[in-house]
Image (spheres, rainbow, N blue to C red):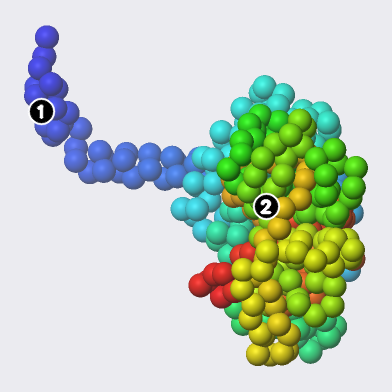
Amino acid sequence: MKSIKQILQHFFTPSKTIGLGILILAGFVGGIGFWTTFDAGLEYTNQEQFCIGCHEMENNVYQELQSTIHFKNRTGVRATCPDCHVPHNFTDKIARKAQASMELWAKLTGEVDTPEKFSKKRLEMAKREWARMSENGSAECRSCHDYNSMDFDKMSADARDQMMDAAKNDQSCIDCHKGIAHHMPDMSAGYKAIMDDLNTQALETSVRSGNTYYTLHNKELFLDPEMTKKAGLMISSVPVEVVRSQGDAIEVKITGWRKKKGSGKIIMQDFARNIRVASLQRKVAKTKGFFNVLDAKEDEDTSITWQHVDFTLWTDKTDLVEEVEPIWEYAKEAYTATCSRCHSQPAEAHFDSNTWVGMFKGMLDFADFEKEEEQVVLRYLQMHSSDYSNDH
């Protein structure tokens, strides 16, 4: 048997019967043939009919595309599947093709072969594509839509302001234009799934005296362990220290800041910060000796005196978790998913905690949050605002 060395020597030894020129010519012709075949195959797989034949889209997103301006418009210029979803430069195109070939497994296994299956996976697939387009600056979009070629004077006033700002920051198109060619997925599915997990965690939480927990949902507060005398409401993500327990009730210590002037029934997270912790009934807040005053400071901007206080009230043992970060993860997902429908959402540290109140309320008409969801998302934004972050 020949050794590997002998085989290699035979492979590289010049032929005694075929001329060098013929070998070079054969290699050249073979290379052209290979490249032509490869290029033709690449071009064939880069056509819309091929796309909808191999990917589960013909009865889903392809139908949606046909009702948009990218499919039919006054100029007759169409954007096909590969125009938007396949990189135009060669190396990135090859990488994307290789990646897409792995997606054929879903075709073979029928993972998304019905509208119901497709709908369940839609958010996951959309997020993956949005992330890709965000990473490359929406390069495919900008092969047609170039900032330098835009006539901003022909845009509406609102569009002009948005587009000029986007051009100034070289912003990725997908930040603001999700859903422009296909229907938006159910954005609530992601953060609601996180909340489902948190609810399970809360059921498994063992509440012990002396430990600090975080409220997963809004919780009613009571003056008595029998929980018959209502005292107020504590909102989600608030830290509470368990003092003692009695049956199904626990006495909790809550710490915060209140305005000395007036009833002072609204408890805030921090000095002169409009970050709500709890709302107490007026008669409870006015009860002499109810608050333990730890400190008092005057706000130089408003001349209002604030008191740093703690107090104890009763609530039930449910809906408590040991860490706040999972709640912030839920709130961040809710904020990102909901507010990115219309525009690129501001970074959390873009505003201070008090400014976020007005900004967030101005966006609520375009969101579909429930009241409790509004409160926890606002608290998340405020607790990650420029007051508490170096990223502003």
Q: Let me know if residue 297 appears in the view.
A: yes
- Left or right: residue 184 versus residue 109 is right
- Residue 299 is labelled as none
Q: Which image quadrant is residue 20 in?
A: top left
Q: What residue is rendered at 67% in x and 22% in y?
A: 109
Q: Residues within 10 Å of mark 1 (few under 14, many from 20)?
A: few
Distance between mark 2 and mark 1 Cα atoms = 84 Å
- Looking at the rendered structure, the secondary structure element under dot 1 is helix
Residue at figure coordinates x 42%, y 45% from the top left: 32
Q: Quadrant of the image for the N terminus?
A: top left
* 97 sits left or right of 229 in the view: left
Q: Is residue 39 above or below residue 157?
A: above
Q: Which residue is mark 1?
A: 9
Residue farthest toward the front in the current orientation of the protein: 288
- Residue under label 2, please give it: 253
- 319, 260: nearer the viewer: 260
The picture places residue 136, in percent across and down from the top left corner, at 55, 61
